Amino acid sequence: MKKFRLNFLFVMILLLTMIVAACNGGNEEGSGDTGDEGGGESPSQDLSLLTGGTGGTYYPLGGQIGNIISDNTEANITPQTSGASAENMETLRAGEAELAFSQTDIAAYALEGKEMFEGDSIDNIQAIASLYPETVQLVTTAESGIQSVDDLKGKTVSVGAPGSGAYINAMQILEIYGMSDKDIKAQNLSFDESTDGIQAGNIDAAFITAGTPTGAVEALSAQNDVVIVPIADDKIQELVEKYPYYAEDTVPSGTYKIESDVKTVAVKAMLVATKELDENLVYEMTKALYENTDQITHAKGEFMTPETALEGLGDMELHPGAAKYFEEIGVAN
């Protein structure tokens, strides 16, 4: 009996020792995990970048910009197709995305409560940078016989998707020529729909505001003799004086197989962020973009330089993170 008690006591002491050891080991492991979490990298932040339709410039360029930022910062960028500038501003207002492409004029209208934002300004957006010229292209084919803006009277013309920058550009150019959408058979179509309509013979011409060459127009030029209708010099001057966000521009010969340069106008494409985005994160994103523009294979990448990043922004406020980067490299606002 005495021997049994001694054996039982030995077993209990052994079990108690094992339990204490296990508890101490668990505490040490837990302490190690806490230390790792405290000293590890911050988790990536998922952000949406609103672009435009697949036939324009925003979408393919947005994919490349998204990759650069995702590869070099803690932001994980997901580009999204959209109805472009005006729709993008409304989506940012609603808090359903954090970053967006826009024309500089449309972003300014949003901040000022003008044009399509009349009396309903958007106050939660700030500029990161302007990127490249967006050319206003009045596209048709040789078969249409349209050679000037005046020739659009009575024709079926796409003036851009509802709420798009192209729509505002079309209305302002028609205005300078003493016309309105009442003088044409206006159609509200995306870039792809516009060029498909020209190809099918359903529409005669289309206003397309995008960086050249534009994918949808290139596709049209593969099977048709594309014509870019010029804007007369006096009308360009009149347009710029009334709407200062425009600048004279040229579609170079060879683009879409055209034989000579065509004079037109352009606005600037820009990158916009919501005010709520962290300053340091926006700083890192801006820095990553401008230190890796050599990775952009899109034709518009050559226009994206720190020296031109603040052109065309007017009185728009820079996001503090972007301002910090440009101040650091000596680019004045």
Image: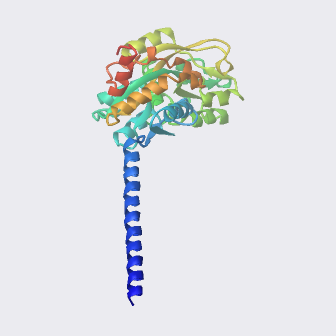
Q: Quadrant of the N terminus?
A: bottom left
In depth, the one of 158 and 180 nearer the eye is 158
Residue 50 in the figure: left or right of residue 316: right
The answer to whether any part of residue 29 appears in the image is yes
Is 218 above or below relative to 94?
Answer: above
For residue 279, above or below residue 21: above
Q: Nearer the viewer, residue 192 or 65?
A: 65
Seen as rendered, the residue at the extreme right is: 223
Coordinates of residue 284 in the picture (x, y in percent): 42, 29
| In front of the other: 280 or 140 | 280
- Residue found at the far left of this picture: 119
Q: Quadrant of the C terminus?
A: top left
Residue drawn at (65%, 27%), measured in percent from left and top?
Answer: 218
Q: Is residue 174 visible?
A: no
Q: Position of residue 72 (x, y in %)?
A: 49, 32
Q: Quadrant of residue 307?
A: top left
